[in-house]
Image (cartoon, rainbow, N blue to C red):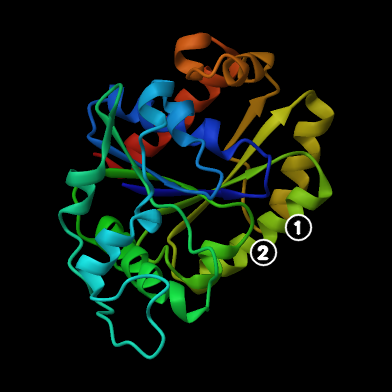
Amino acid sequence: MKVAIAGKGGVGKTTIAATLARLLGRAGLSVLAIDADPAMNLATALGISPALVKTIVPISDNPNLIEERTGARPGETSGAVFNLTPRVEDLASKFGVPASDNTRLLVLGTVKSAGSGCMCPANALLRALLRHLLLHRGEAVVMDMEAGLEHLGRGVIRGVDVVMTVLEPRPPSIQVYESITALAGQLGVRTVMPVGNKVANTTEEEFLRREVEASGHKLYASIPYDANVVGAEMSRTALLEFAPNSPSVKAIDGLKQALVETYAT
């Protein structure tokens, strides 16, 4: 089961990704949670201690590793030849950070200057690593993607089973969802799963349903606006610890169940 969680910035992707990953772990799956968002907030949302969070070095910010695997050091690659298919099969085990509920976190980081020569070795390593994680490893993967379309546009999520698109009941969020849906289809993703979040009332939920159905899909879930999410963020803890019986957790648990029934049986 490989799930990429996408959407406009600020719609709540990270909280959903972290909660979903741990609930899948509680369901008996071995889960790798991938932070592919430059904001890199997934560790905190998973409930990893602040002291440990401070020690995490993203893969893209590890020049020694990049040089070891690609043969070129970021920043020193003008005219250099480097390996476009580096060895990556051990990186999840070496750099994965244990989290609760049978979940491990791998922080990818980002290519800060996409297309610039000095960053190509980092880009090659990240792409090879993602291909390996999505196509060849056996555990469940939940990937918190960067806001917008960048990862989809680079085509690095080929091999995922589901693109879960998180929407707020606002037109700009709908526009990003429609673009993500189109790109996911071009990349051969089998399932797009629209999920409403921060839904305050039935009027907002009906707005989302109409917009999603007009695009040829159905709204899989509607996660209510929940002040506990803000409380968990302010306390720098996981929502599952801060408010385990909150409305948002119950809604995400329903998503977990749907995924398990479809992809883990």
Is disc 1 in contact with disc 2, using a CB cutoff of under 8 Å? yes
Residue at x-position 80% and y-position 32%: 204
Q: How many marks?
A: 2
x and y, in percent, of residue 178 in the image: 68, 60
Q: Of residues 5 and 220, which is closer to you in this image?
A: 5
Residue found farthest to the bottom: 79
Is residue 225 shown left or right of residue 220? right
Residue 95 numbered mark, or none: none
Q: Is residue 19 visible?
A: no
x and y, in percent, of residue 265 in the image: 24, 39
Residue at x-position 79% and y-position 26%: 202
The kind of residue on which mark 2 rests is Ser
Q: Of residues 42 and 174, which is closer to you in this image?
A: 42
Q: Of residues 220 and 239, which is closer to you in this image?
A: 239
Label 2 Cα neighbours within 10 Å, binned few <14 / some 14-19 / many ≥20? some
Q: Is residue 133 above or below residue 26?
A: below
Q: Is residue 221 above or below residue 37?
A: above
Residue found farthest to the front: 76
Residue at x-position 51% and y-position 10%: 242
Please tell me whether mark 2 sits on a helix, a strand or a loop.
helix
Residue 179 numbered mark, or none: 2
Q: Is residue 190 above or below residue 45?
A: below
Is residue 160 shown left or right of residue 179? left
x and y, in percent, of residue 249 in the image: 52, 19
Residue 175 numbered mark, or none: 1
The kind of residue on which mark 1 rests is Gln
Q: Is residue 163 visible?
A: yes
